[in-house]
Every structure is written in structure tokens, then in C-alpha cells.
Amino acid sequence: METQKTKKNKKKKNKAIKSVIAHPLAAEVQAIENKKLEVIKTGHTVSQEQIDAWKAEHGEVFRIAVDEHTAYLKKPGRKAIGYASSIGTKDPMKFNEIILKACWLAGDEKLQSDDDLFLACGSKLADLIVIKQATLEKL
């Protein structure tokens, strides 16, 4: 039999899930998560033609490697950064997870599923987000 506290916790959890699902980028992130991407196994590399195609489509392309595990990433867009930031206020690890999934082009999926490899990637994900310096002058 459920207690009053258990019911309240379930309601809070369901409300949080609904708010995440309602976000406009949530469906896009879910699609990326569900999409089956080419898994690059140890010892295999992506062709230069594939990298050039990604650059033409996404701009800059990055390779991240941890030990023998490699993945290819694109820069995150404003929507992905905003979505990750809003979720990241409550769960900082979720920020890295969302950014990694939003930027993922191809690679060894162990980088997303293995905690040690994921944490190693997380330390480099901030380098994907480049903030340029602006100037402001009073006229």
C-alpha cells in the first residue's frame, strides 16, 4: 500500500517529467537519443569524406577520445545549450549528458554509457561552447 509521501513523490516526479517533455527541444533530444548512429569500433576511423560532409552540414567537427574510445561531435546550438542549462540547474550531470547527445555525430557509444568514460568526456564538453567577447559603448 502506498503511503502519502510516496504518492507525493510520484506526483512531483511525473510533473518534472511532463515539464521536460513539454520543452520544444525535448522531442529533438529524444530523437537523437533514439536514432541509431554508426558505432565506430576500436581500430576503425571515419573517412575524411565523412568528416568533410559533416563539416559542410554542421560547420566545425570535433573528435573526442578517451583511451581507445572515439566519438565525433558538432558544436551545440543555442537551443541545445538553453535546454541543457535549464535542466542542468537541478541536475548538473544531466547538462553534460544533453550536450553530448545533442552534439553526437558518430562514435563508440560506450562514451555515453560507461560512467568513467562519460565523466572524462564531460570535462571537455565545455570547450565546445565558445563565448566570444562583445563590446558595448554608450553613444
Image (tube, helix red, strand yellow):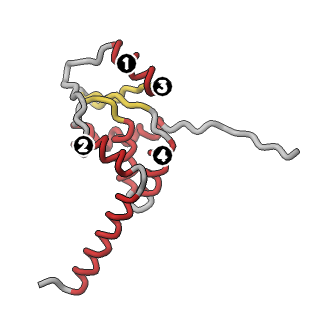
- Sequence order check: which comes first, mark 2 or mark 3? 2
Q: Earlier in the sequence, mark 3 or mark 1?
A: 1
Image quadrant where one finds the C terminus: top right
- The answer to which of marks 1 and 4 sits earlier in the sequence is 1
Which tag, 2 or 4, sits closer to the chain's start?
2
Q: Amino acid at mark 3?
A: Gly
The quarter of the picture where residue 73 lies is top left
Task: Give the mark, 3 or 4, whose residue is nearer the N terminus.
Answer: 3
Q: Which residue is mark 4?
A: 79
Amino acid type at mark 2: Asn
**Left or right: residue 57 compared with residue 44:** right
Q: In terms of secondary structure, where does tag 1 sit? A: helix
Residue receiving disc 2 = 34
**Given the image, on which type of amino acid does mark 4 rest?**
Lys
**Mark 2 or 1: the one toward you:** 2
Compared to residue 82, the image places residue 15 above or below, namely: below
Give the residue type at disc 1: Ile
User: Height in image: 6 above or below 133?
Assistant: below
Earlier along the polypeptide chain: callout 2 or callout 1? 2
Residue annotated with mark 3: 59
Which is in the foreground here, disc 2 or disc 3? 2
The reply to whether the C-beta atoms of the residues labelled 1 and 4 are less than 8 Å apart is no
Is 102 situated above or below 58?
Answer: below
| Residue situated in front as seen by the camera: 87 or 23 | 23
Q: CA distance from mark 3 to mark 1?
A: 10 Å
